[in-house]
Image (cartoon, rainbow, N blue to C red):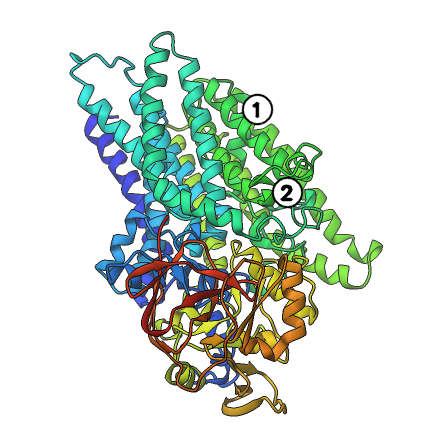
């Protein structure tokens, strides 16, 4: 092949990658459909379901009920982050969920992610969609460049890149817009390691020294970018993988090992320093959080990857699919899907079994290790039995990321070796592929046998479930049969261009297979469905005046949605939230002074509106899907089946108390609160040693909240005697208070609210939150 033709083919294959990404995102690029599951907003939740959208009188059909977290968490958090950054403020606090919760310390907000600059150029919605697209685009390019650096052929690099970016793991988490951004930097990290090791001499006289430092900078930036992208667990897996890769490279060095270790040690130290601004507040938050008590039990079904779900590596929808509303497998489809395509799987197995070199052994080891710890094996249970911090509260199914990455690279290795041997050792390599085809044929045959014999051995619901499995076996079986026939036919024909035809067939079938899989799972929505306003929401925005709301049904204004509309809510949904809030809500919901941590599975949605804690926390608005008749409630708005009530017994958001009841600990504190109930309007309870003389409220005492922002609260007060001011916001150590510009102390009162001793006279009370 001429140099010109070879150059043309290399460029052609490389530009095929962005073309594939364009093809996948065509609804966004050409038709203005956003890769945001906004159809679930207007199709699943009230009050949006009470409105007719696009003349859909029966309601908006939503594509994938499983993909709701992106609009319940990542989208709303990043929206608030960007709002604060555009004001020139560091987004430290979110007042709209959990009655107030740390924002920057919430790792998934990705406050410092460098690609956030797009939000300052484009509208938020467009920038969000563009970031989702960039996950795939940058990921596929970095993967291709990494594989090329390993001296693999361009065709093999395309196969491995496509397999990874359209793999089950990547597609399942694509619209979260955090996990994919953590993952995409891994191949760039590995590429930079390879580039640095091309020539391990670092003499100042080396003419390549500037290039070395360039790739050291790329190495550092890829780690920093991955860390700031917003998912600590996936970053930890990626970091362990890249660090192990680096150590394996250093071990194989014949010399200069110490110099290499020193150079990379400096980079890791710089990484530690640069990322300090994120991990330090996160670490503080974790220590005060309920994560260790409210992440579900590792003993529950679905915590580990079920053994039977290994079937999804060859038939992704054997147990159904949430988009067709027929998933019948254990728990969560998205947690268990590791499909990389039939043909990439065949060549990954080919490399694993028939190519013996250090890189294949390394990848095979991590593939094996990731599955060992993801599956319910005795080894996988060790971190949970020993209660190892962080690991014991992390679901191991996310290790599928490492499995998919390893298999994708192995697929490229296998495809490359097979192509290289196509002419010289054609029939010997063909026998190895035939062996893999026979093994997979047995697997497919067993699956078909199970589904076809359902009527003879099973009955009831299982018959219907296996009928779903049978239908969903058809497509992967056709892909497998197509490859097998092409393989057999082409290897019996002796012609010069058979090799090129075989490569094209493999790539075409793989692209067709994985694009179909990705399109099936991924929703694209109309822009007008992304958090639109309704009559009830407009009423809340006009009248809320910083009072809080609560919903009596998770189908109304689900947790975190209120953040978009700047409405304060007592509910919240986050893997990280304060343990003290968990205890208060547990007692609230139990309607008794029991602060044993509750198991809410990260989702706080109190519904006991008749309890006094409702009034204490400033819940003035209550949403219901049915009419309510209570003395404390007054109907102020309705929309469809959504009813909005005003709580007539609500406490002010800030008030003076006449007396402080001192108790010994938190248990006594909650017991005293349950004894006092509505009297908490005039008596505060605290286990802290607050020194203040009892007094009586005067009609001349006034409190006015002049400013209520995310990071700042300004209150103007007037009182005749020294008083304790209670602000019904959640207590957090990083909040500071200033009285007339002078720093004072915030006391924790009424279990986890803020109290400030205010001297007589007129004063300006300012609450500010600091980073440290």
Element class at badge 2: helix
Q: Quadrant of the N terminus?
A: top left
Q: Which tag is nearer the camera, tag 2 or tag 1?
A: 2
Pick the residue in front: 302 or 673. 673
Pick the residue in front: 7 or 213. 213
Relative to 642, residue 109 above or below: above
Residue 353, which numbered label?
Answer: 1
Element class at badge 1: helix
Residue 448 appears in the picture as rendered: yes
Pick the residue in front: 65 or 580. 580
- 545 vs 234, left or right, is left
Residue in the image at 47% along x and 28% along y? 414
Residue in the image at 52% along x and 89% along y? 640
Residue in the image at 29% along x and 22% along y? 196
Q: Earlier in the sequence, mark 2 or mark 1?
A: 2
Give the residue at the far top of this rendering.
254
* Residues at marks 2 and 1, CA–CA distance in whole angstroms: 19 Å
Q: Residues within 10 Å of mark 1 (few under 14, many from 20)?
A: some
Residue wearing tag 2: 310
Give percent across and percent down for residue 737.
37, 61
Pick the residue in front: 34 or 597. 597
Relative to 51, residue 104 above or below: above
Relative to 505, residue 96 above or below: below
């Amino acid at each position: 092949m001429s140099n010109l033709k070879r150059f043309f083919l290399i460029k052609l294959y490389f530009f095929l990658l962005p073309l594939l990404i364009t093809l996948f995102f065509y609804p966004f690029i050409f038709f203005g459909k956003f890769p945001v599951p906004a159809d679930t907003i207007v199709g699943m939740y009230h009050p949006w379901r009470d409105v007719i959208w696009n003349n859909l009188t029966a309601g908006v059909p939503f594509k994938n009920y499983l993909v709701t977290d992106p609009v319940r968490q990542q989208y709303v958090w990043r929206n608030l982050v960007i709002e604060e950054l555009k004001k020139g403020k560091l987004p430290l606090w979110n007042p709209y969920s959990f009655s107030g919760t740390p924002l920057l310390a919430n790792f998934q907000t990705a406050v410092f992610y460098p690609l956030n600059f797009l939000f300052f150029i484009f509208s938020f919605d467009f920038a969000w969609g563009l970031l989702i697209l960039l996950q795939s685009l940058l990921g596929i390019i970095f993967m291709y460049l990494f594989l090329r650096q390993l001296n693999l052929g361009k065709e093999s690099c395309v196969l491995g890149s496509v397999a990874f970016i359209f793999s089950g793991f990547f597609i399942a988490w694509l619209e979260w817009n955090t996990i994919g951004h953590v993952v995409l930097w891994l191949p760039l990290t590995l590429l930079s390691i390879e580039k640095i090791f091309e020539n391990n001499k670092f003499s100042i006289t080396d003419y390549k020294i500037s290039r070395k430092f360039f790739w050291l900078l790329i190495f550092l930036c890829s780690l920093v970018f991955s860390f700031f992208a917003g998912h600590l667990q996936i970053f930890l897996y990626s970091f362990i993988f890249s660090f192990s890769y680096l150590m394996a490279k250093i071990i194989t060095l014949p010399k200069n090992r110490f110099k290499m270790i020193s150079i990379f040690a400096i980079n890791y130290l710089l990484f530690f320093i640069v990322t300090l601004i994120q991990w330090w507040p996160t670490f503080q938050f974790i220590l005060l959080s309920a994560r260790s008590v409210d992440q579900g039990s590792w003993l529950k079904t679905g915590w580990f990857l079920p053994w039977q779900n290994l079937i999804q590596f060859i038939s992704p929808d054997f147990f159904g699919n949430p988009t067709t509303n027929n998933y019948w497998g254990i728990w969560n489809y998205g947690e268990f899907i590791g499909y990389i395509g039939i043909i990439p799987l065949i060549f990954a197995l080919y490399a694993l079994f028939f190519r013996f070199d250090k890189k294949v052994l390394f990848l095979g080891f991590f593939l094996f290790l990731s599955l060992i710890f993801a599956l319910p094996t005795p080894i996988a249970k060790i971190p949970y039995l020993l209660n190892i911090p962080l690991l014991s509260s992390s679901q191991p199914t996310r290790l599928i990321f490492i499995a998919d990455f390893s298999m994708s690279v192995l697929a490229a290795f296998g495809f490359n070796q097979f192509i290289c041997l196509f002419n010289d050792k054609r029939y010997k390599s063909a026998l190895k592929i035939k062996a893999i085809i026979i093994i997979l044929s047995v697997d497919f045959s067993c699956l078909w046998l199970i589904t076809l014999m359902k009527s003879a051995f099973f009955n009831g619901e299982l018959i219907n479930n296996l009928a779903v499995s049978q239908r969903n076996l058809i497509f992967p079986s056709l892909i497998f049969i197509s490859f097998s026939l092409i393989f057999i036919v082409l290897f019996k024909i002796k012609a010069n261009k058979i090799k090129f035809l075989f490569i094209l067939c493999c790539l075409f079938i793989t692209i067709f297979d994985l694009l179909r899989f990705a399109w099936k799972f991924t929703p694209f929505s109309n822009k007008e469905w992304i958090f639109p306003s309704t009559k009830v929401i407009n009423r809340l925005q006009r009248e809320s005046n910083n009072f809080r709301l609560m919903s009596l049904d998770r189908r109304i204004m689900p947790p975190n949605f209120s953040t978009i509309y700047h409405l304060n809510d007592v509910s919240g949904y986050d893997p990280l939230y304060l343990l003290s809030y968990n205890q208060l809500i547990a007692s609230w919901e139990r309607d008794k002074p029991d602060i044993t941590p509750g198991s809410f599975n990260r989702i706080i949605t109190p519904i006991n509106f008749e309890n006094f804690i409702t009034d204490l926390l400033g819940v003035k608005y209550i949403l219901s899907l049915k009419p309510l008749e209570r003395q404390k409630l007054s109907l102020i708005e309705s929309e469809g089946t959504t009813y909005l009530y005003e709580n007539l017994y609500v406490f002010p958001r800030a008030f003076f108390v006449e007396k402080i009841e001192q108790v010994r600990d938190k248990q006594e504190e909650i017991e005293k609160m349950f004894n006092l109930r509505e009297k908490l309007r005039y008596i505060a309870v605290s286990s802290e040693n607050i020194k203040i003389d009892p007094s009586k409220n005067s009609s001349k005492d006034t409190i006015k909240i002049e400013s209520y922002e995310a990071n700042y609260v300004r209150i103007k007060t007037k009182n005749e005697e020294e008083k304790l001011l209670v602000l019904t916001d959640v207590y957090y150590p990083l909040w500071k208070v200033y009285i007339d510009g002078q720093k004072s102390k915030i006391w924790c009162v009424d279990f986890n609210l803020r109290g400030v001793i205010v001297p007589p006279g007129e004063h300006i009370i300012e609450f500010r939150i600091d980073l440290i």
